[in-house]
Amino acid sequence: MLAIVATALRSPHGSSADELASAIADNEARADLDKELVDDYGFPVMSARSEDAHDDMLQDEIADWMEGHGLQVRLSDEQWRALTLGTAVAAELGSLAAGDLMPSEGAPPTLQLTLMLPHDWAIEIRRAVTMWFKHTVSQYGWPEASIITTDRPDQDQVSPSALLAQMMPTKPAAGTRQVALVIACASLIGQESVDRLAAQSALFTSSQARGRIPGEGAAGLLLTDLQLAQSCSAEFALLGPISERRRDSSADETRRADSTRLLEMVEQVRKEAAVDISQINMIVADTAHRPNRVLELMGLSAPAIPQVDAADDIVRIGLGSGSCGAVPFVTVLALARHYALERGAPVLCVGNEDPILRSVALVRPPA
């Protein structure tokens, strides 16, 4: 069991969970026609663009820092946008970690910095970005020597839910303290990304309604163990259990919607958490616009979870985030903390936008 002590977001529709929840409530968290990007025929594409993704001064600062540390990497426009958004999240959570979880006396616990970067980023770029984020977090008081990073070569093949599940403590030794900072960032807001999606027949257009909508954003979680969370002043929610399963075939290749797998996963996590199905108050998912994903998600409402209203209690993050790697699922968890504390009830988190992977997690207020 982990505790979510704090969250940070930079999304196209809000710079915090509160702002994003407000935009969702007002039905404003949706993709729109992009002001710059066009398809193969010169028509504007749908996108989820963040106004916080471009900062010339920060870009110059990062470039100078990397050059000063011998990091000779060349970033694309999309990578700069992702890095800009991710830096804001790292700075915000680094400040909160130092303020809420740094002991007044003695050595601080090790802070595990876990980054969920786009799968197609080259290893040298991943390494440079990881070093920059570590530096950013350390600027707010957490000693750099006490920050460890997880940037394994196989991390590209590990899903966000699996990474978080691996972080769950089993039986921590007495006196040990666990602090982790998880950050996802990505951007497909660039003509290069649009052209690549179009070449793969994977871009959402009027004639390709099952395509992907380019998006961008960054989302982060500040996590710790229950004992440390209870000793700090921050309001926290509990994260876990987390379940992940794989489909037998890609959901992109079928129009059929089947909720059976998700229903089984929901039953698994609620049993592990000793939570009755009637206690679940809300569902937050990374689902976007594709009909088979939407119908699969809606299979979790009546009669399976009858108290959850499909119109008011099921939130689909993908409508406003677009396609941007691990960011929507981490955003789901950040929003779930907001709703769990606001409603005082467990919130079900669902990941079904991926063609193969299905993820279910529970976020709830402390007992």
Image (cartoon, rainbow, N blue to C red):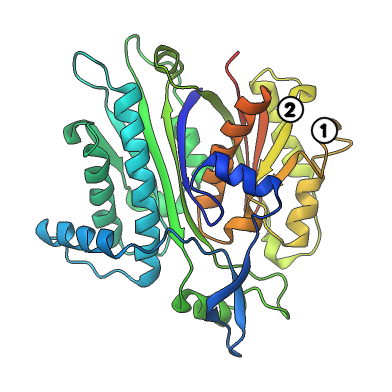
Which residue is tagged 2?
A: 280
Asked if 286 appears above or below 347 in the picture, the reply is: below
Asked if 119 appears above or below 151 in the picture, the reply is: below
Residue at the far top in the pictured view? 174
Q: Residue 152: percent from the left, percent from the top?
A: 33, 48
Q: Is residue 6 left or right of residue 206?
A: left
Q: In front: 132, or 361? A: 132
- Residue at 64% x, 27% y: name it: 342
CA neighbours of label 1 inside 10 A, class few (<14), some (14 to 19), many (20+): some
Q: Is residue 3 left or right of residue 152?
A: right
- Residue at 34% x, 44% y: name it: 90
Quadrant housing residue 202: bottom right
Task: Name which residue type carries label 1.
Answer: Ile
**Is there a contact, CB below 8 Å, between mark 2 and mark 1?**
yes
Quadrant housing residue 122: bottom left
**Whether residue 350 is visible:** yes
Which residue is tagged 1?
A: 305
Q: Is residue 201 left or right of residue 257?
A: left
Q: CA distance from mark 2 to mark 1?
A: 8 Å
Task: Name which residue type carries label 2.
Answer: Ile
Q: Residue 273: percent from the left, percent from the top?
A: 64, 21
Say what secondary structure mark 2 lies in. loop
